[in-house]
Image (spheres, rainbow, N blue to C red):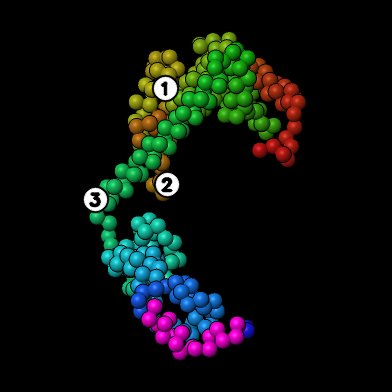
Amino acid sequence: MTHAPGKYTDFEGLREQAVALRRAGLSRRQIRDRLHVDNNDILNRLLQGEPAPEWTKRPNAKDDLREKARELRLQGWTYDRIQVELGCSKSSISLWVRDLPKPERRAPTEQAKLAARKRWEHELAIRDEKRQRTKQAAAQEIGSMTDRDLFMAGVALYWAEGTKDKPYDRREAVIFVNSDPGVIKLYLAWLHLLGVERERLQYRVMIHMTADVEGAKRYWADLAGVDVARLQKTTIKKHNPKTVRKNVGDTYRGCFVICVLQSADLYRRIEGWWAGMLSGITTTPTSGMV
């Protein structure tokens, strides 16, 4: 680059002025404007070896973060805790403290365990509340059951859970077994809708030998609205020591068996109703259905 003739001919003199200004605390920009030096190369040569004044040095915020991160790491903090505390990335933290020893894993204190348990209980409570809201909203969508609603539900329920006739085992008997009180309640309401007399019903409990047999009999009899004396002989399931049972506790009451006497005609009608429901389906599944 060419410059105006004679502009920098007295270089040493110019340097003396630049050094004096630098030592007086002026910045490069101030020296350049004062001496009218518009060439950075010349300015660098004029100030060579002269450190910049402190006030011109920009503070590096990351230097403070780095030192704080190292301090916390030496106290045994994890990367996650340091990140939350300082608001910097894990990659930066790793770079700053990689030469420091890893903190020893500390066993959680009782207070920490209690805090964790409290947080988990709070989370479970929130989940349960959301679950209950969903169930309540769904229940309200059903509303009152019409006779046709109950009829269709009963047919589908029996075909899913009741005994069925087989070509190799002709029985044509209406027998229903289930352990869900709500299912039993709906099934009994369905039989009443069909006009099945209570005198035609036989009841029996099927239960594991280690359970509260008498308590279960009273429970199912109350649900069916009959006296315990009306129940037939209980079917007891023997205990297999190799099997780990999960259906234990106060809520285990075995299964309730309901048989309809002289039910061959009713069974045939149920089978026909089910066939009619299938033939009445007007839509077919498609690949786009979820």
Q: Is residue 123 magenta?
A: no
Residue type at mark 3 is: Gln
Q: Is residue 34 above or below residue 119?
A: below
Residue 148's disc is: none
Residue type at mark 2 is: Thr
Number of marks drawn: 3
Residue 220's disc is: 1
Q: Earlier in the sequence, mark 1 or mark 2?
A: 1
Q: Is residue 7 magenta?
A: yes
Residue 288 spot, x, y in % from top left: 72, 39
Q: Can residue 118 be seen in this snapshot?
A: yes
User: Circle 1: is it few (<14), some (14-19), or many (20+) Cα within 10 Å?
Assistant: many
Q: Residue at x 66, y 38 (%)?
A: 290
Residue 147 spot, x, y in % from top left: 60, 12
Q: Residue at x 73, y 35 (%)?
A: 285
Residue 111's disc is: 3
